[in-house]
Image (cartoon, rainbow, N blue to C red):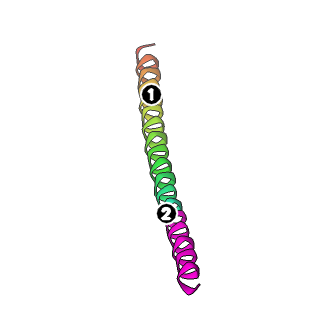
Amino acid sequence: MPSARRAEQMAVLAIGGALLLGGLAGCSTTQEKAAAHRAESERILEAREKRQQKKKQERKHDKEKG
């Protein structure tokens, strides 16, 4: 029965390999999501900064006028 045992070992190795690859794929997906989230956060902060600068300039302009 050594061949039956060998088949079990190969099945366990195949399942383990599939789980490992799945884990690695999930990890990269998580990293990609995190990178996309960081990029979106940066865009939001940059837009906020532009709005604040614009408001500052408008207030400065209004003070000079009035």
Q: Residue 16, percent across and down?
A: 55, 70
23 in the magenta segment: no
The kind of residue on which mark 2 rests is Leu
Q: Earlier in the sequence, mark 1 or mark 2?
A: 2
Q: Is residue 22 above or below residue 52?
A: below
Magenta segment, which residues?
1-20
Q: Position of residue 30 (x, y in %)?
A: 51, 52
User: Label 2's element?
Assistant: helix
> Of the residues shown, which amino acid type is indicated by label 1?
Arg
Residue 8 sits inside the magenta stretch: yes
Q: Residues within 10 Å of mark 2 (few under 14, many from 20)?
A: few
Q: Secondary structure at mark 1?
A: helix
Name the residue nearer the viewer: 39 or 30: 30
Pinpoint residue 12: horizontal percent, then vertical percent: 57, 72
Residue 25: x percent and y percent? Answer: 46, 58
Examine the rendered structure and indicate whether residue 27 appears above or below residue 53. below
Q: Nearer the viewer, mark 1 or mark 2?
A: 2
- Residue 11 picture quarter: bottom right
Say which residue appears at 44% left-offset and 27% top-offset: 51
- The residue drawn where x is 59% and y is 81% is 5
User: Residue placed farthest to the bottom in the image?
Assistant: 2
Which disc, if any, is residue 51? 1
Near-viewer residue (6 or 62): 6
Residue count near mark 1 (Cα–Cα under 10 Å), binned few <14, some 14–19, many ≥20: few
Asked whether 53 or 35 is in front, the reply is 35
User: Image height check: is 18 above or below 65?
Assistant: below
